[in-house]
Image (spheres, rainbow, N blue to C red):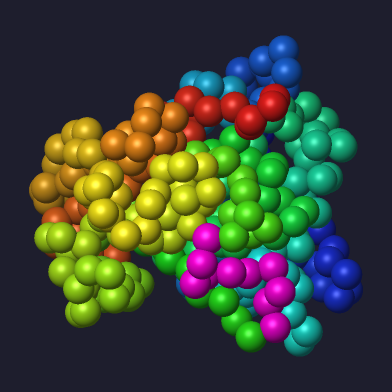
Amino acid sequence: MSGSGTIQTSDGATHVWYYRIPAHAAPPHGHPVLIWLHGDGGTGNGYGSGFYPYTDADAAILVTPSGANQTWTHAAGDLAGQPQDSQFISRLIDAMIANGVAGQPIDPDRIYVGGESRGAYMPYYLLQRPSTMLRFAAVAVNAGLLYCQAGDADCEVDNSMPTNHAAATPILHLHGTNDTAVEPPPTALFHNPIDWNDDWRVFFPMKLWATQHGCFGGDNSTGQDDGVLQETYTANTHPARRYDLTGWGEACSRYQLILVEDGGHVIGGQYQRIWSFLKGYCRAGG
């Protein structure tokens, strides 16, 4: 069953979201939910259909919100004069937990969020927003990064801080090494301009969260920040490499980076891989 709903934010704006409920009955604790966010110029209507075979099979509800004006306000907090997209997602989660989706109960400990391109920035903001930072069982980012706008008191990008980055949420980040639309910034610790043959080890921006949980040191004095190569495969005819931070311990496998050589912007065809990562986690304490 598919449908749509609306959520109003505190500025009086009405936001639209879409859902797909699989035919499978809800598990005992309710349906898992994947919130998947579109890129610039898109909408949630019919978005993320590549997940259907996988989320349907696991009785998961796919929720695809529409960002205001077919884009997303990149902010963790609510900025005056800008659409309150992060607040929209926060209120949507509250509504789903309280009322389910079209009468179907959801599992509050198995809510996942991810997106592509401009929508892929949003999980990093939601992991810093106080009302959402502890909501997610895991997140996935396909060609997104992080920056902070002036006045966004909930956003911190320069340093790993307990207030902003305390969530122990597993993170999967996918990026093409020649992505010029969302180009990873250089880092003084390694190379400027960035050299992806070496600098994949910066794990930005997931390192902000990994540092808080003993999974990233910052100066790479022991080499552990380099990550551990766990898998090589082919993504759309391009070599792909999957790394994690298990050099710091097995618990650090929850921070994973996939780099696709010459992969360009947004790594396509990764629906099964992304969902397999996400569904393996339940919210801490849940």
Residue 153: give x, y in percent of width and height.
Answer: 71, 74
| Position of residue 6 measured from the top left corner of the image (x, y, whole percent) | 79, 57
> What type of secondary structure mainly makes up the magenta span?
loop
Give the residue at the far front of this rendering: 221
Along the viewing direction, whichever of 63 and 165 lies nearer the viewer? 165
Q: Quadrant of residue 44?
A: bottom right
- Say which residue appears at 19% left-offset and 34% top-offset: 231
Q: Is residue 150 above or below residue 201?
A: below
Location of residue 119 with respect to 260 vertically, above or below: below
Q: Residue at x 64, y 37 (%)?
A: 111
Identify the residue at horizontal 68%, vertical 77% (top origin).
152
Query: In screen coordinates, is 118 left or right of 238?
Result: right
Q: Position of residue 191 (x, y in %)?
A: 20, 73
Residue 77 seen from this side:
yes
> Along the horizontal axis of the image, is 196 left or right of 117?
left
Q: Is residue 70 left or right of residue 273?
A: right
Residue 152 within the magenta-colored segment of the rendering: yes
The span shown in magenta is: 151-160
Name the residue: 57% across, 41% down: 168
| Residue at the limit of the structure toward the top, as seen here | 28
Q: Nearer the viewer, residue 170 or 7?
A: 170
